[in-house]
């Protein structure tokens, strides 16, 4: 919904409103929080809380205000993670990090966090216009690294860097000034900001998997302990994407995607049909090294490498679009002519870059936006850290409608009600096109009104159901959106696309969209739906969205649902349900033959089950050591994942 529509439809509440009992997300609009933050409008809402645009009434300054739902505020670990996010954003204090300025509690017990209001364009939206020229890409990546230099110096690992969490804002004449957002799933030292010198603990455990699959370092995907080098892998993926318009690894199946990242080296940029200087290729390859020890040791090393590369390119006249740093940061390198070169206006010729080869949509998943939520994937004991469906720092940016592809439009419009004659069909085509344009412009109410009239006359048009789904989704009517998704998928076999799966999964995590979304996952999406249910149940939602996780586990217990599971998922579910060491041992042969990386996440920790018996020195699962079955199963799955 665009900002004007949001403002027009947001109901207000009296300034002295009493915040008691359950409330709708809109109910805070018009309320003054903590005596100084006036809530102007709702900008995003999810299962954990809501994000508002607010104004500090004394300073007359806009800010973003995140509020936990009251029921979430009664969960100690959720509150603890919310506090950690506040501490991370507050203590980093860096020009390229969106800052947190306040933290408190509402009258009903809900916690709130006040953040810097960032107005600009996300790196994801900027990429919609195509790959960046070389100098511009290096400029953006360097700024991200300077933000990481500060965060890592405090022991903070972001763990969810991606284009959605990087904003480009206008600042001091630089239209590409970077702001890094959303430390909601960051790894944060427990005692950050205190004078306590006792050993620090962290609110994470080995085996938990945090992040967004497309940007996860291999060790992160396997639930191993992560450090700053996991963030460098994400930076490498972003750099690769900025230069090519594609990510190094692409697969619509997140299990296969993780297997590629865990077992394969990233393809060279040249393999995507893009020519870059060899030193740029080498830098990105090192960021994307599969083994963390082969990556840069710290952010200062990355920045120094970037500066050396850019200095060389400037000398060669190949740093097209380069802008000098906007803040005082680590040395720009030892090249004596570099500083003067950086300040020359208009003297950076573009590097000749071959456009990336774009395969047909029907043959490759190509670029899709990653999951709207940071995804927390299955590992041993996997659980999620708190994060909102909405952005951590509210962004004022243009929302785009998504026009149907030519292939989709052709196949959908071919299905017309038999009672509609040719001339009437042409009229309906015009109405559908009008509605599509309204969706693109964010006028969702107008689009719905047009489409409902068309639906009465031609209920079997797949394109109408597609546009109704998109319009209701844009208007935040998740229940109606999911209802039309079901109709669309029944009419058009090509409707099942990666983006659609993401939207169904996200809807299942919300109160309004859960019922129709779960119905789709259980009956209308076959094996893909079962995979999504598994991710909701054990991919971290147990703590992030406990109600949705519990419901997904109930769904997966139904024989009709389990019957649709792949062999790999079936054995993974059996391993999770195995009540004893002997029961696990009996499944090892099946796991060896059919298991995938999800199964691997359960098997690997079984190799080190110490902690039982006297002083915790005994093996808890001795039966798994009677032969090589466990070792062979792990090796077989790893070998299969590499293919």
Image (spheres, rainbow, N blue to C red):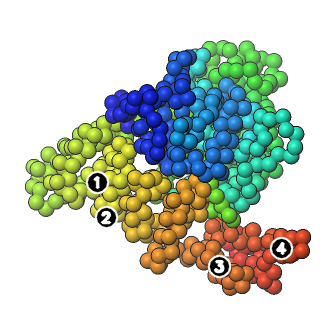
Secondary-structure class at tag 3: loop
First of labels 3, 1 by sequence position: 1
Q: Which residue is mark 1?
A: 465
Given residues 512 and 364, the one toward you in this image is 512
What is the quadrant of residue 188 in the picture?
Answer: top right
Q: Badge 3 local density, few (<14 within 10 Å), some, or many (20+)? A: some
Mark in front: 2 vs 4: 4
Q: What residue appears at the point 83 percent right and 71 percent down from the top-left corner?
A: 610
Q: Which residue is mark 4?
A: 612
Q: Is residue 441 above or below residue 263?
A: above
User: Which of the numbered marks, if any, corresponds to residue 578?
Assistant: 3
Q: State the CA–CA distance, disc 4 to disc 3.
A: 19 Å
Mark in front: 3 vs 1: 3
First of labels 4, 3 by sequence position: 3
Q: State the CA–CA distance, disc 4 to disc 1.
A: 57 Å
Residue 363 rendering spot, x and y as whole percentages: 46, 58
């Amino acid at each position: 919904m665009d900002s004007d529509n949001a403002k027009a439809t947001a109901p207000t509440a009296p300034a002295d409103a009493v915040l008691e009992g359950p409330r709708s997300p809109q109910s805070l609009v018009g309320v003054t929080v903590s005596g100084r933050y006036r809530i102007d409008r709702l900008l995003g809402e999810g299962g954990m809380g809501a994000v508002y645009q607010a104004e500090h009434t004394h300073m007359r300054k806009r800010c973003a205000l995140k509020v936990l739902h009251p029921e979430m505020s009664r969960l100690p670990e959720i509150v603890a993670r919310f506090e950690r996010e506040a501490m991370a954003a507050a203590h980093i204090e860096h020009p390229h990090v969106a800052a947190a300025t306040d933290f408190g509690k509402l009258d009903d017990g809900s916690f709130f966090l006040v953040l810097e209001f960032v107005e600009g364009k996300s790196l994801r939206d900027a990429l919609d216009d195509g790959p960046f020229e070389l100098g511009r890409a290096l400029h953006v990546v360097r700024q991200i690294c300077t933000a990481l230099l500060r965060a890592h110096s405090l022991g903070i690992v972001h763990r969810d860097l991606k284009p959605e969490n990087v904003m480009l804002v206008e600042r001091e004449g630089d239209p590409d000034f970077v702001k890094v957002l959303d430390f909601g799933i960051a790894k944060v030292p427990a005692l950050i900001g205190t004078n306590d010198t006792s050993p620090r603990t962290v609110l994470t455990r080995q085996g938990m998997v945090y992040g967004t699959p497309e940007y996860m370092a291999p060790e992160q995907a396997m639930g191993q302990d992560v450090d700053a080098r996991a963030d460098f892998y994400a930076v490498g993926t972003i750099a690769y994407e900025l230069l090519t318009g594609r990510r190094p690894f692409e697969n619509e199946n997140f299990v296969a995607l993780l297997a590629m990242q865990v077992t394969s080296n990233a393809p060279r940029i040249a393999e995507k049909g893009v020519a870059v200087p060899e030193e740029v290729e080498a830098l990105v390859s090192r960021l994307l090294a599969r083994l963390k020890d082969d990556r840069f040791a710290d952010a200062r090393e990355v920045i120094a490498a970037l500066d050396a590369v850019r200095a060389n390119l400037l000398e060669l006249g190949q740093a097209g679009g380069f802008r000098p740093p906007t803040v005082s940061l680590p040395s720009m390198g030892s090249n004596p002519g570099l500083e003067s070169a950086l300040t020359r206006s208009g003297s950076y010729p573009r590097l000749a870059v071959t456009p990336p080869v774009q395969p047909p949509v029907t043959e490759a998943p190509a670029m899709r936006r990653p999951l709207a939520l940071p995804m927390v994937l299955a590992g041993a004991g996997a659980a999620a850290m708190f994060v909102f469906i909405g952005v951590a720092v509210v962004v004022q940016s243009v929302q785009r409608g998504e026009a149907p592809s030519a292939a989709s439009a052709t196949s959908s419009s071919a299905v017309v009600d038999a009672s509609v004659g040719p001339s009437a069909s042409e009229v309906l085509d015009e109405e559908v096109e009008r509605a599509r344009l309204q969706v693109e412009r964010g006028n969702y109410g107008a689009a719905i009104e047009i489409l409902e009239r068309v639906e009465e006359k031609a209920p079997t048009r797949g394109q109408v159901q597609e546009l109704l789904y998109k319009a209701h989704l844009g208007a935040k009517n998740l229940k109606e959106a999911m209802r039309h998704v079901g109709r669309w998928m029944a009419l058009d076999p090509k409707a099942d696309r990666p983006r659609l799966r993401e939207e169904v999964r996200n809807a299942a995590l919300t109160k309004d969209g859960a019922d129709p979304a779960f119905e789709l996952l259980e009956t209308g999406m076959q094996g893909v739906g079962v995979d999504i249910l598994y991710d909701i149940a054990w991919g971290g939602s147990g703590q992030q969205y406990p109600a949705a996780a519990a419901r997904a586990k109930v769904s997966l217990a139904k024989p009709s649902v389990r019957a649709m599971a792949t062999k790999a998922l079936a054995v993974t579910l059996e391993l999770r349900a195995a009540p004893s060491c002997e029961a696990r041992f009996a499944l090892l042969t099946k796991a060896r033959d059919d298991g995938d990386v999800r199964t691997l996440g359960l098997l690997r920790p079984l190799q080190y089950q110490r902690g039982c018996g006297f002083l915790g020195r005994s093996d808890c699962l001795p039966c798994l050591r009677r032969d090589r079955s466990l070792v062979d199963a792990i090796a077989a799955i790893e070998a299969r994942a590499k293919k």
